[in-house]
Amino acid sequence: MSHAYATEEQVAVAAVRRACHLTSSVFNRLVKNETLTKGDKSPVTVGDYAAQAVISSILHHAFPGDPIVGEEDASDLHAEEGRLMRDRIIELANEALTAELGLGDSATAEELLDAIDRGNHPGGRDGRMWTIDPIDGTKGFLRGEQYAVCLSLIVDAKVQLGVIGCPNLPVDPVAPERGIGCIFTAVRGHGAQQLTLNGSNPTPLVIPQTTPETLNFLESVEAAHSSHSFNDRVSSLLNITRPPTRMDSQAKYCCLARGEGGAYLRMPTGVGYREKIWDHAPGQVLVEEAGGVVTDSRGEPLDFGLGRTLGENFGVIAAGKEAHSRVLAAVQEALNETKAKV
Ligand SMILES: Nc1ncnc2c1ncn2[C@@H]1O[C@H](COP(=O)(O)O)[C@@H](OP(=O)(O)O)[C@H]1O
Ligand SMILES: [Mg+2]
Ligand SMILES: [Mg+2]
Ligand SMILES: [Mg+2]
């Protein structure tokens, strides 16, 4: 790890590992009153809050001056109704923080809620900032399917480091006996790799060439998050015969980076939703460092300097270089068809 972000990468992998152990152990013990519905109707669990507290505390310890753009905030936990959840989050976060990192005595409830709220940075074009998505794909997490613990370092609006932990993802899709649980890391200019969940056995990742027979789309499970019907249309324009692979979270970027699927296509459903930077920053650097290309549906790069969101939603196309240009052309053809209809 001889590069400018070696310390950041080491700290980020340690933080993601800790959070992955926390979330997978929480899943087996999750009970009904440990999930809330946020203002935008999306779910959040004690696992999301505790994992953000852990990652934010570890980052603060190592890089006290760095701002954080984190998905969660502790506002729903201050009220009396939030007390049971709050106690559980504190217990889980302290278990994870004191386990092996030697961060000293247990943190107080106030310190951990502050750690969660340190994720309130507005983002922007200048300087260093971290993004945390403590559980990406909370719906997948609740179903016992794919989810990801996602961390990135953005410097002057460019993602320099991405670390994604996927506790439920098979280590090797064609060798199920190797078990589940992987961590993916990428540093701009230094490649992408997959590690085991305990941080060992680094394997470099390079996206292979695809043909229409081997190409298929990776897409969200949730129809509300991206248009399944648009992807169907693009598939038929490209003569893709394999059905799409539906999977929650940035595990889609990880699978793409190691040669599964061939293209990740996420087109807006038309409800005016703005994509969040923490849902794409680590995936973008991972796919680019594995030799792929990530753009919106116009072929423009994603802009991580606009704030907490990517701005107006033109969707996301991620694929290997050659597949990307074919998919982009088909996406534009499908968009033109839609325009011609209205
Ligand atoms: N209407 C919408 N359109 C696109 N993305 C949405 C959305 N509503 C929620 N999301 C985002 O979709 C993410 C999950 O992506 P996917 O569908 O690929 O698993 C969620 O992340 P969280 O689960 O971290 O909240 C959330 O940020
Ligand atoms: Mg969420
Ligand atoms: Mg997310
Ligand atoms: Mg999340």
Image: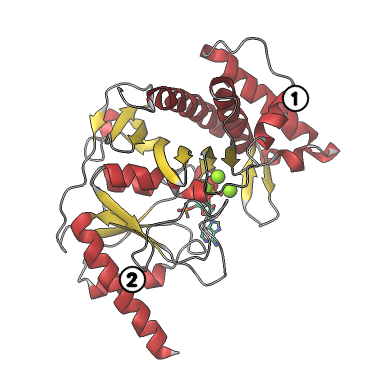
* Badge 1 density bin: few <14, some 14–19, many ≥20, Cα 10 Å: some
Residue at 56% x, 23% y: name it: 58
* Badge 2 density bin: few <14, some 14–19, many ≥20, Cα 10 Å: some
Residue at 64% x, 19% y: name it: 94
Give, as a three-letter code, the residue at label 1: Ala
Q: Which residue is mark 2?
A: 232
Specify the quadrant that holds the C terminus. Answer: bottom left
- For residue 235, which quarter of the picture? bottom left
What label sits on residue 109 in the rendered view? 1
What label sits on residue 161 in the rendered view? none
Q: Is residue 292 above or below residue 97?
A: below
Considering depth in this image, is 24 or 255 the residue closer to the camera? 255
> Going by the image, does 16 lie left or right of 81?
left
User: Can you tell me whether the CB of the residue at mark 1 lies under 8 Å from the nearest atom of ligand 4?
Assistant: no
Query: What percent of the width, then of the height, locates residue 14?
Result: 45, 23
Give, as a three-letter code, the residue at label 2: Asp
Of badges 2 and 1, the one in the foreground is 1
| Residue ranking furthest to the front | 126
Considering depth in this image, is 199 or 66 the residue closer to the camera? 66
> Going by the image, does 29 lie left or right of 341?
right
- For residue 159, which quarter of the picture? top left
Q: Is residue 138 above or below residue 231?
A: above
Specify the quadrant that holds the N terminus. Answer: top left
Residue at 44% x, 67% y: name it: 314
Secondary structure beneath label 2: helix
Q: Along the polypeptide, which appears first: circle 2 or circle 1?
A: 1
Query: What percent of the width, then of the height, locates residue 13?
Result: 42, 26
Q: Is residue 288 visible?
A: yes
